[in-house]
């Protein structure tokens, strides 16, 4: 498969309007490279772990779009458009970057490595002409900086894998989390080891919200624990509950990719698929999913998702909790702590503990009866 990477050099203030404008001509995902620190809200919207900042903000931004093209497309790599040359900082075809990557669209989904393909290869000549025209229109009423457009060739493996440079083995207390491309060090072989490859859509356990959940699960899990994980993703929380002695896990997620991700991570950790059941659907709104998940079946329910989602989820999920069961939530920025605490108490749950890590919060509650 052949892909072209289109890079637009602009200024940070123009990022959103350019992305929105180009969305209208079919460029549906963007990789943003700039040096603007992420806000807590932006971090909350991202479902992948966040690479470290490398440089001070210089006001410059690079917007990268990945499009599928026919094999014989005659557009040279590093082709230059809009009358200006490629900047010395512009990215080449390997897709790598030292700068912060942020969601291209404010939809609560990270589009950083999501190429555009509608099933039909893109006519690059037509597309580039459209991009030039749209940028010129924008330039007439706002500052878009250089507005230069460069093209390079990339491959699936490039944009699928370049995030790996940011993910290395790390520990969470007595737990070593390690990707498949690294080896366990001799001094770590006595630790409990979680092998995890998140892919491009799900987290690794590096984020504070995941670590908050992990510590709470370890605190409450027993050999008889049946756990429900709402928003399963890579399966890391359910897998950890099984590693620490839990009996079974049911996971729900909106993204069908979670099924394969969980299966791969179960295999990597030598855990039987029989212990982990995945369901795709919205447990908040779909009665069918609620019925399949079951009622008053779970000793622990964990939900590492947005605070705004926890509000409608909590009054639903109390029906899945056994009497005496524990409800662990995270994905909550500090400013939303009171909102979630009020939500669990309004649902009839008893607040057990609120824990913090960095600017993030986990709220743990109990269903008394």
Image (tube, rainbow, N blue to C red):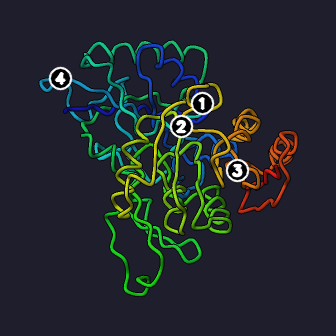
Residue in the image at 36% along x and 24% along y: 83
Location of residue 359 in the rendering, given as x and y in whole percent from the top left corner: 73, 56
Tell me the mark number nearer the camera, choosing from 3 and 1.
Answer: 3
Side of 357 relative to 54 (left or right): right
Towards the viewer: 102 or 323: 323
Distance between mark 3 and mark 1 Cα atoms? 23 Å
Viewer can see residue 62: no
* Element carrying mark 3: strand
Location of residue 130 in the rendering, given as x and y in whole percent from the top left corner: 38, 13
Distance between mark 1 and mark 2 Cα atoms? 7 Å
1 or 4: tag closer to the N-terminus: 4
2 or 4: tag closer to the N-terminus: 4
Tell me the mark number nearer the camera, choosing from 4 and 3.
Answer: 3
Number of on-image labels: 4
The residue pinned by badge 2 equals 103
* Element carrying mark 1: loop
Pointer 4: residues within 10 angstroms few (<14), some, or many (20+)?
Answer: some
Distance between mark 1 and mark 4 Cα atoms? 30 Å
Q: Are marks 2 and 3 in contact (CB under 8 Å)?
A: no
4 or 3: tag closer to the N-terminus: 4
Residue in the image at 20% along x and 30% along y: 76
Location of residue 237 in the rendering, given as x and y in whole percent from the top left corner: 55, 56
The residue pinned by badge 3 equals 329
């Amino acid at each position: 498969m052949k892909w072209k990477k289109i890079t637009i050099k602009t200024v940070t203030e123009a990022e959103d309007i350019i992305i929105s404008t180009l969305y209208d001509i079919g460029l549906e995902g963007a990789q943003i490279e700039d040096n603007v620190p992420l806000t807590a809200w932006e971090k909350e919207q991202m479902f992948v772990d966040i690479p470290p900042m490398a440089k001070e903000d210089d006001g410059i931004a690079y917007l990268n779009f990945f499009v599928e093209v026919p094999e014989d497309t005659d557009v040279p790599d590093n082709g230059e458009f809009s009358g200006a040359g490629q900047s010395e900082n512009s990215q080449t075809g390997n897709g790598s970057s030292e700068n912060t990557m942020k969601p291209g669209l404010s939809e609560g989904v990270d589009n950083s490595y999501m190429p555009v393909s509608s099933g039909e290869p893109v006519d690059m000549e037509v597309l580039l002409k459209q991009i030039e025209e749209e940028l010129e229109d924008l330039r007439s009423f706002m500052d878009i900086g250089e507005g230069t457009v460069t093209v390079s060739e990339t491959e699936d493996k490039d944009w699928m894998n370049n995030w790996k440079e940011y993910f290395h083995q790390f520990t969470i207390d007595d737990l070593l989390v390690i990707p498949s491309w690294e080896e366990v060090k001799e001094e770590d072989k006595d630790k409990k080891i979680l092998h995890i490859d998140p892919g491009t859509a799900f987290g690794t356990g590096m984020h504070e919200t995941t670590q908050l959940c992990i510590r709470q699960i370890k605190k409450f899990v027993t050999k008889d624990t049946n756990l429900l994980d709402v928003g399963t993703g890579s399966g890391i929380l359910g897998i950890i509950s099984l590693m620490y002695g839990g009996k079974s896990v049911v996971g729900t997620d909106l993204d069908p990719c979670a099924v394969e991700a969980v299966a791969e991570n179960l295999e990597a950790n030598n855990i039987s698929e029989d212990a982990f059941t995945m369901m795709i659907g919205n447990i908040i709104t779909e009665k069918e999913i609620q019925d399949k998940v079951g009622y008053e079946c779970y000793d622990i329910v964990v939900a590492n998702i947005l605070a705004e989602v926890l509000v409608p989820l909590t009054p639903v999920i109390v029906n899945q909790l056994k009497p005496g069961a524990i409800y662990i939530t995270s994905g909550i920025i500090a400013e939303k702590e009171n909102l979630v605490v009020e939500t669990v108490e309004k649902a009839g749950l008893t607040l057990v503990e609120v824990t913090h890590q960095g600017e993030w919060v986990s709220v743990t509650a109990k269903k008394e009866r």
